[in-house]
Image: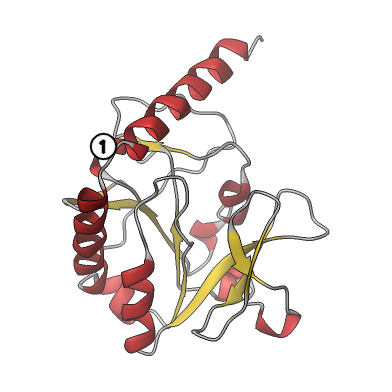
């Protein structure tokens, strides 16, 4: 079976939505970040959670900075993804505190400097907030193409982890062309709506 048309469709959609996301003004981005924090800070699963994994925004992604500050103020432990130094395509999640030193990884994204004492095993996280490029009304998620989060979330339904996708409203599309390894999400939160899907426990 020739997967080239599917790969091309995913690549084109990725390019289109990244352009759409990057076209948002500073004011629109700022307003979206405030609305996201309001939604997350009132989310039952977030309120119950002790350990929350999230990412630092990049490439026009919805800013997570104000939500991270809310987590610190409310005594939630925050963890950031770090590209695994030995296991290709996998992530580690390291504790992120105000004094944490950040370095630029191979993709130019800031991450905590590797320190094995700060690593939290994936199955001990309560919530993993995942970035995405596009999503549809089935919960299908299109990432940047590295498969990092698909690997991290491959068995989430056998754990107590709750994955939450975060995105701008403009990142919703009619249909995401999916591959067999893509992991659908139970819920995706945008500034204007909580999109809950079949697997949601809320």
Query: Observer-nearest residue: 195 or 12?
Result: 12
User: In this rendering, does residue 75 appear at all?
Assistant: yes
Picture coordinates of residue 148 (x, y %)? 62, 49
Where 200 falls versus 1 (above or below)? below
Query: Observer-nearest residue: 88 or 55?
Result: 55
Picture coordinates of residue 150 (x, y %)? 57, 47
Where 120 falls versus 24 (above or below)? below
Query: Observer-nearest residue: 76 or 185?
Result: 76
Picture coordinates of residue 173 (x, y %)? 30, 29
Task: Look at mark 1 in the image and give the residue it sits on.
Answer: 170
- Give the image quarter of residue 40: bottom left
Quarter of the image with the N terminus is top right
Where 111 falls versus 109 (above or below)? below
User: In this rendering, does residue 138 appear at all?
Assistant: no
Q: Is residue 201 left or right of residue 5?
A: left
Picture coordinates of residue 3 (x, y %)? 62, 15
- Give the image quarter of residue 50: bottom left
**Residue at 45% in and 24% down:** 177
Extreme residue in the right direction:
86
Where 3 falls versus 88 (above or below)? above
**Residue at 71% in and 85% down:** 117
The structure's colour scheme is secondary structure
Q: Badge 1, how many Cα within 10 Å: few under 14, some, many 20+?
A: some
Q: Is residue 183 left or right of residue 191?
A: right
Q: Secondary structure at mark 1?
A: helix
């Amino acid at each position: 079976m020739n997967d080239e048309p599917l790969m091309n469709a995913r690549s084109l959609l990725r390019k289109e939505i990244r352009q759409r996301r990057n076209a948002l003004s500073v004011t629109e981005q700022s307003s979206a970040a405030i609305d996201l924090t309001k939604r997350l800070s009132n989310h039952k699963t977030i309120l119950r959670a002790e350990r929350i994994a999230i990412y630092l925004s990049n490439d026009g992604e919805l800013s997570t900075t104000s939500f991270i500050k809310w987590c610190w103020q409310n005594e939630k432990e925050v963890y950031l993804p770090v590209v695994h130094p030995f296991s290709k395509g996998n992530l580690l999640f390291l504790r992120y505190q105000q004094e944490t030193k950040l370095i630029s990884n191979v993709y130019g994204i800031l991450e905590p400097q590797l320190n094995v004492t700060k690593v939290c095993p994936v199955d001990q996280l309560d919530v993993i907030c995942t970035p995405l490029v596009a999503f549809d009304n089935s919960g299908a998620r299109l990432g940047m193409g590295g498969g990092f989060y698909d690997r991290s979330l491959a068995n989430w339904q056998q754990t107590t982890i709750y994955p939450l996708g975060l995105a701008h409203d403009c990142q919703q599309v009619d249909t995401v062309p999916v591959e067999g390894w893509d992991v659908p999400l139970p819920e995706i939160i945008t500034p204007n709506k909580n999109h809950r899907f079949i697997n949601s426990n809320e």
